[in-house]
Image: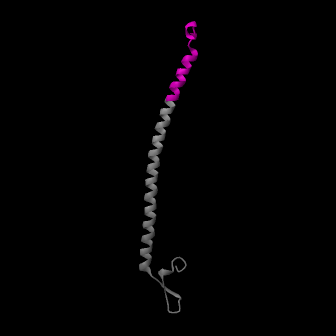
Amino acid sequence: MEKVNPALVASDPQGRPYSVRYDAVNAMLLNEFLKEHRKVESLEKAMAEQHKENASMRAMLKEQAAQIQKVSAQLELRKSAPRTALDDQ
């Protein structure tokens, strides 16, 4: 315990550890838990934002694919339409 957090160890007059301050251990553990909990909440928020962004990007891709398909169909119609002398004027 002394290596992890020396403040949690009570020492004798010669400086040797003789007891653990268990009351302080609980407070330290709670503090560490709260830090990790805040990290998890932050990561969850970031993940939710990414999900929204991904949904938006998927919608944009679908729209672009539809536009590309429309333009491709128009090009195919132009290619296959027979040309007449009037088209050249």
Q: Return the residue nearer the eye: 21 or 85.
A: 85
Q: Is residue 43 above or below residue 59?
A: below
Q: Is residue 52 above or below residue 3?
A: above
Q: Return the residue nearer the eye: 1 or 34.
A: 34
Say how the picture is coloured.
one colour
Residue at the extreme bottom of the image, as rendered: 13
Identify the residue at horizontal 58%, vertical 10% (top origin).
88
Looking at the picture, how far across and down is residue 27, in whole percent? 41, 74
- Which residue range is magenta in the image? 67-89
Quadrant holding the C terminus: top right
Q: Is residue 69 magenta?
A: yes
Q: Is residue 64 magenta?
A: no
Residue at the extreme front of the image, as rendered: 89
Identify the residue at horizontal 53%, vertical 80% (top origin).
2
Identify the residue at horizontal 46%, vertical 37% (top origin).
59
Identify the residue at horizontal 43%, vertical 78% (top origin).
24
Looking at the picture, how far across and down is residue 35, in whole percent? 45, 66
Looking at the picture, how far across and down is residue 33, in whole percent? 44, 67
Labels in figure, total: 0
Looking at the picture, how far across and down is residue 78, in whole percent? 55, 17
Q: Return the residue nearer the eye: 65 or 84.
A: 84
* Quadrant hosting residue 25: bottom left
Which SS type dominates the magenta stretch? helix
